[in-house]
Amino acid sequence: MAAHISKTFLNVLNRGSVSVVNKHHHRSVWVISSCCTRTVSSISAAEPGLTPRLSSHLHGKSYTELHELSLRDPETFWGSIAGERLTWSKRFEQVNDCDLATGRINWFLGGQLNVSVNCLDVHVARDPDRVALIWEKDEPGTEERVTYRELLEATCRLANTLKSYGVKRGDRVAIYMPVSPIAVAAMLACARIGAVHTVVFAGFSSEALAGRIQDAQCKVVITCNQGVRGGRLINLKATVDAAVESCPSVQRVLVARRTDNPISMGKLDTPLEEAMASASPECAPEPMASEDMLFLLYTSGSTGKPKGVVHTQAGYLLYASVTHQHVFDYSPGDVFGCVADIGWITGHSYVVYGPLSNGATSVLFESTPTYPNPGRYWETVQRLGINQFYGAPTAIRLLLKYEESWVKRYDRSSLKTLASVGEPINHEAWEWFYNVVGDARCPLVDTWWQTETGGICIAPRPAHEGGEIRPAMAMRPFFGIQPALMGEKGQTVTGNDVNGALCISKPWPGMARTIFGDHQRFVEAYLKPYPGHYFTGDGAYRTEDGYYQITGRMDDVINISGHRLGTAEIEDALDAHPDVPETAVVGVSHDIKGEVPFAFVVLKEKAMQEQEVVLEELRRLVATKIAKYAVPDHFLVVKRLPKTRSGKIMRRILRKIAMDQTDSLGDVSTLDDPSVVMEIIQAYKQTFRG
Ligand code: 7RM
């Protein structure tokens, strides 16, 4: 029995009948059907599918009225939505209790619920054979479907397995896996028993993984033997083995099987499918308080190590759910295709929690945009009948370089909404996505948000019916979001046609609650810069008509192919080299990746003769300490770095030099020794212009 399941678990997930999903598409305007508050104990199969709604109180109002209400009276707005959309085992008593000055953020106090019940059991009760996940595996045409009933069973088996290894409420579990049904089951299994998952992107190195496991003090790691991407195998288990050597908190490693290749199993390791096969398929959901932790997700800031951003249960789920429905115009029966990895927040909110809470069919995309050819996305859209396609500008910029026929040969008539996330989308990419992919027929929504915001905060939808969409612009704040632009002196910039630091002035249910183990750092990073407001780290422009356009990071965070990285992290990795006293990393633009790291390095005298050797060692160092994608594309060896009299490196000047924009260097008079600038420009010319 165990052996059988072990061999075919991923197929076992797929056994049973696959229902024909309801293909009845009606537009979700703000028609809002009423429905009573459900409780875990009274889930009945009587209710038909989820109907598009905010809540019965909010019936038929316009976007403007609703947005205004959401800011003026968040209790009524979010209270009625939370009461009707979520299934509670104990109804909440207070909608919110927040103070942005101290970072006390609480939503739906007194309430209890279980996120996995909201993502699984409620749908199983109504329509167990509805497809929850379509696993679009690396090889085209080999997709596997998983129904809600199957996903619930897998989740319960995995939850019981975790319990059998001592995982309790509040314990942290690391998940180091590519997108797959079993990874989704692992996230939901944690949610079911009240454990806290921290998914680590499977492209991170063993040291990066170890750092996160140590910070979170994870008890268990869930991984798989190998990953498969773009026709290549990635030895994930080997990376985990190396990581856990320095992680004494880890008591067990659960290893799923993605490929049939042999794996060496150590004394900490357990084959996951076998353990699940002997575990019970039922697991009572743990009732969780609204503000209990749901997950940690590490993200980069401008200084220090990555921060463990904390999201909690009810507010996060509600916000992911409502944004998923209303930004993408999701209707019951739609196949929702977000091609992000679950290692990033986009995967958490719009592959897993948002779509599943809405009973959607969510696509898990394992491959790459160009495997086996640049038509992959659109062939997948045709084959799976994807209705909403959510991707990153970097992939669009890559694909638009190929012949249009790679798009046109596939039937894309299922598409209703196109959406973009992760970095600013440039006009060329927007126009190509809209015109070539969408045949100028589907709304293309540029969605702005962050790991810390939990869900989409600024996007062209919702809007009034027929609300116009401007190219390459996130435009409108979502319900509950009050953007503010701040000036250099900390003042609120009023009026239109203005720039400023983008802040959000009121708490919203999806916002991060703290940094794991370091609330002070949370307050310092987000709440101190503009007291009374949440600071995003981004700059924005408010147009003449009051729409928002994101201009990019204002801090030392760069965005490589939509992956956020602190330049300080790369510097720390480089500085670990014994021959490197000092480095400075800046982001420079790249036509496909958006930005790439450019490293200025100072070498010790003795290393100057063997520069190439040292640079190669530096490349390897960044790959092993962080990830391959973090390795700087460019290195420039310099004698000194430009510093102010107080010793701060002036990255602004380095960025100009790295971008070859030395005619607009700006003020260099605050430098301790301005002659260093000419010195570096000379080095740049010698290295990059021959
Ligand atoms: C969802 C996500 C967040 C940072 C954010 C921005 C940048 C994200 C957009 C964008 C311009 C967008 N979370 N960013 N979306 N910039 N337009 N639509 O990406 O935590 O990984 O990154 O990404 O700088 O602060 S994240």
Image (spheres, grey):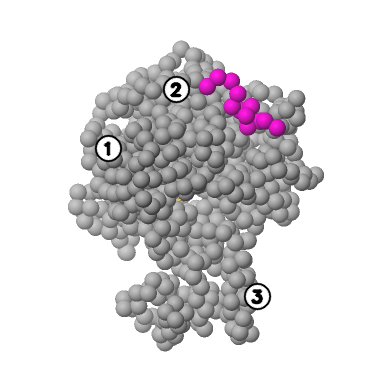
**Label 3's element?**
loop
Visible residue check, residue 384 = yes
Local crowd at mark 1 within 10 Å, few (<14), some, or many (≥20)? some
Image x and y of residue 23, in percent: 39, 23
Q: Residue at x 48, y 44 (%)?
A: 340
Q: Is residue 39 visible?
A: no
Question: Which amino acid lies under the numbered mark 3 shown in the image of this protein?
Answer: Pro
Q: What residue did someone put label 2 on?
A: 21
Could you tell which of marks 3 and 2 lies nearer the N-terminus? Answer: 2
Label placed on residue 684: none
Q: Are marks 3 and 1 in contact (CB under 8 Å)?
A: no
Q: Is 617 above or below relative to 516?
A: below
Q: Contact (CB < 8 A) between labels 1 and 2?
A: no
Earlier-in-chain disc, 1 versus 2: 2
In the image, residue 662 lies at what x, y percent? 35, 78
Q: Is mark 3 within 8 Å of ligand 1?
A: no
Report the residue that reaches farthest toward the top.
46
The Cα atoms of the two marked residues, 1 and 2, are separated by 24 Å
> Circle 2 sits in a helix, a strand or a loop, which is it?
loop
- Say which amino acid is labelled 1: Arg
Q: Which mark is residue 578?
A: 3
Q: Quadrant of residue 667?
A: bottom left
Badge 1 marks a residue whose secondary structure is loop
Label at residue 441? 1
Q: Residue furthest right?
A: 267
Whether the magenta-drawn stretch holds residue 8 is answered as yes
Residue at the image point whose x is 41% and y is 34% from the top: 382
Instruction: Judge left or right: residue 575 versus residue 431.
Output: right
Q: Which residues are magenta?
A: 7-18
Q: Is residue 283 magenta?
A: no
- Residue 105, given in percent of the width and then of the height, sits at 46, 42
**Residue at (63%, 32%) from the top-left corner?**
10
